[in-house]
Image (cartoon, rainbow, N blue to C red):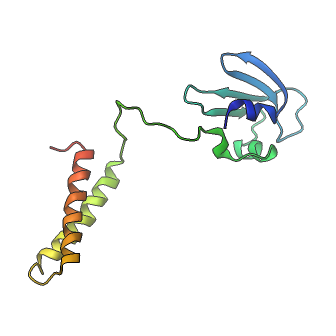
Amino acid sequence: MSVEIILSRLEGVQDSGRGQWYARCPAHDDKSPSLSIKETEDGTTLIHCFALCSPSDITDAVGLELSDLFPEKLEPRRSQKPRWNPRDLLRVIRYESLVISCAAGQIDLINNDELERVKLAGSRIMTALEVADVR
């Protein structure tokens, strides 16, 4: 949602320049502007009440969701790979290795569906290693 729509739901909006505004906070009985609103380069709207109202209380007060403060879809930077938590990668490798280990013990007894699952496990391990940049 654009910052203009968010600003239209607030009272006492004052433009302070450079994509930043002040307004009366709708989450408490605000007599003078104590809510800071800023739009970032990626279209995210940052809000901060200096009386310490929570962002969810502020959005609730004007009929919005917290998700409305963020652009519809963030496009990943082309030059930047997604960051993965190493612990999550290790969990994938551990689980998929277990699948392969179980199948290896019964390789002559598995059917085509089970063989496909073993191939998928191997593929997931290789993808996790690539993501982790392990050579």
The image shows residue 107, relative to residue 50, as above or below, that is below
Q: Residue furthest bottom?
A: 109
Q: Quadrant of the C terminus?
A: top left
Q: Quadrant of the N terminus?
A: top right
Q: Position of residue 44 (x, y in %)?
A: 60, 33
Q: Position of residue 4 (x, y in %)?
A: 73, 29
Give the residue displayed 37% in from the left and 41% down from the top. Answer: 82
Q: How many marks?
A: 0
Q: Residue furthest front?
A: 112
The image shows residue 72, relative to residue 123, as above or below, that is above
| In-front residue for pair 65/89 | 65
Q: Is residue 40 left or right of residue 31?
A: left
Give the residue displayed 56% in from the left and 25% down from the top. Answer: 41
Q: Quadrant of residue 119?
A: bottom left
Q: Position of residue 72 (x, y in %)?
A: 58, 41
Q: Position of residue 94 (x, y in %)?
A: 25, 63
